[in-house]
Image (spheres, helix red, strand yellow):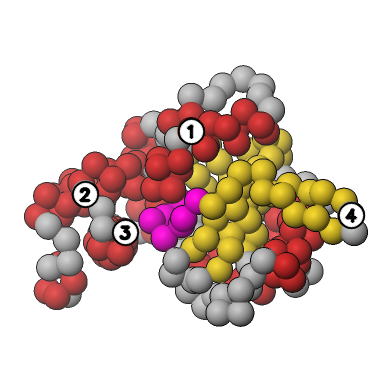
Amino acid sequence: MPKVLLRINWTCHQQILNSCKLNEQRLFYILYAQKERFEVKKLQRAIKTNAYESILDSRDFQSAALQKTYLGSSLMFKDTAYLEFLGLHGKYKESKLRRGIVQHMKDFILELGKDFIFMDEEHKVEVGGKAFSIDLLFYHRGLQCLVAIELKTVEFEPGFMDQLEFYLEVLDQTEKRSNENPSIGILLCKEANREVVKYALNRSMSPTMVAEYREKLIPQETLQRSLEEFIAAAK
């Protein structure tokens, strides 16, 4: 434990001690802050958006192929992304969501993880003389693979997986280099029912995952109340 404590500075330690009551959470944020090289403001955001739960619960939103191909995937990807910096509200189209993400790419990548490198929006691929476009295309430095992100401004539906897996097959067949690993697909939806996602991913043969996005940050009092309820139930 003493060696672990040296991984981040004292200001970050103060933030963790003031915000987390469980030792498991404290250890998680120490390691997470060190991995992402967080300054205190970025650490505050990670705690406020409950990265602890979002990352540790993400396994339920990942296909078996993703977990098998990338053994550490459950600790690399969140099941929830907070996009409050886009200022979205009411009804809007996927194109508005995509444009907002591109305009705030630095904030979006910090929310995803620093190993993501943005490559293209509406990335064009062609199959059988027909043109298709992938909403957002990234490269992951740590995993050395392409990452296709499809955006949905509605609740997750199982049929969305067919489109995503099709794009991954095209990327692997036409764009993946010999030194790169299989492409990963992320379906980012406004909502996702955990049971529906589980059934949809059970038959997925590709490295895929489903994630939700939130338009606003969780109020601090809500997080505090949830943590207190968890502690009371565990006694």
Precedes in sequence: disc 3 or disc 4: 3
Q: Residues within 10 Å of mark 4 (few under 14, many from 20)?
A: few
Q: In this orientation, does residue 233 appear?
A: no
- Contact between marks 1 and 3 (CB within 8 A): the answer is no
Q: Earlier in the sequence, mark 1 or mark 3?
A: 3
Q: Which mark is residue 129?
A: 4
Q: Which mark is residue 39?
A: 2
Q: Quadrant of the N terminus?
A: bottom left
Disc with the residue nearer the chain's start (4 vs 2): 2
Task: Give the numbered dot on residue 7.
Answer: none
Distance from the alpha carbon under mark 4 to that under mark 1:
31 Å
**CA distance for labels 3 and 2:** 9 Å
**Which label belongs to residue 103?**
1
Which amino acid type corresponds to the residue marked 3 in the rendered image?
Answer: Glu
Q: Quadrant of the C terminus?
A: bottom left
Which one is closest to the eye, mark 3 or mark 4? 4
The residue indicated by pointer 3 is: 36
Check disc 2 and give the amino acid type: Glu
Q: Residues within 10 Å of mark 1 (few under 14, many from 20)?
A: few
